[in-house]
Amino acid sequence: MSNIVVFVNYEIKPEFKSKYLALMKELKLNIMAYTDIIYNVYESKEKPNFFSEVFHCPTRFSFNQFNKLAESSEKINFLLREVDKCILNYSHIQKENEHIAA
């Protein structure tokens, strides 16, 4: 049995914080209702509006199950698109400065 832990780090737009937090609560409920993934969202104590999503997948199947759910569930897909609108920078890189590395 393998464990997979996925981290997603980003900064949100300060004016969207309330919306973001509401979306994340709903997203967490949906992820945990349809998968066996342990999912949490953390805000940095040192840097307000910097968040980390942590997906703890007990098996490779769990990880694949979430990916399929993200693609097939209209609700989760909608929530993910709305969350993306709240994000300013991924991993401390401004969106306009991003490019595909590989």
Image: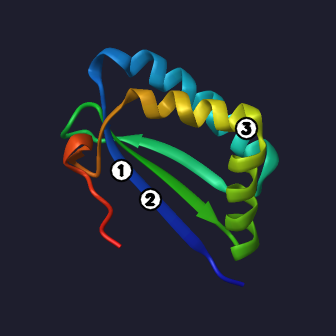
Tag 1–tag 2 contact (CB < 8 Å)? yes
In the image, is residue 57 above or below residue 54?
below
Distance from Cα at disc 1 to Cα at disc 2: 6 Å
Instruction: From the top left corner, tell me how far across and down residue 28 is, in percent.
Output: 63, 38
Looking at the picture, which amino acid does disc 1 mark?
A: Asn
**Element class at badge 3:** helix
80 relative position to 85: left or right: right
Q: Residue furthest right?
A: 34
79 relative position to 6: left or right: right
**Which residue does the image show at 71% across and 49% down from the upper left?**
71
Instruction: From the top left corner, tell me how far across and down residue 24 is, in percent.
Output: 55, 32
Of the 4 image quadrants, the one containing the N terminus is bottom right
Instruction: From the top left corner, tell me how far across and down residue 86 is, in percent.
Output: 40, 27
Looking at the picture, which amino acid does disc 2 mark?
A: Phe
Of callouts 3 and 2, the N-terminal one: 2
Distance from Cα at disc 1 to Cα at disc 3: 20 Å
Of the 4 image quadrants, the one containing the C terminus is bottom left
Rendered image quadrant of residue 7: bottom left
Q: Nearer the viewer, residue 46 or 18?
A: 18
Q: Report which residue position mark 1 lands on.
A: 9
In the image, is residue 5 above or below residue 34?
below
Tag 1–tag 3 contact (CB < 8 Å)? no
**Which residue does the image show at 68% across and 48% down from the upper left?**
70
Looking at the picture, which amino acid does disc 3 mark?
A: Asn
In the image, is residue 68 above or below residue 14?
below
Q: Report which residue position mark 2 lands on.
A: 7
**Element class at badge 1:** strand
Instruction: From the top left corner, tell me how far across and down residue 94 is, in percent.
Output: 21, 43
Label number found at residue 30:
3
Tag 3–tag 2 contact (CB < 8 Å)? no
**Which residue does the image show at 28% across and 52% down from the upper left?**
91
Label 2: how many Cα within 10 Å (few below 14, some 14–19, many 20+): few
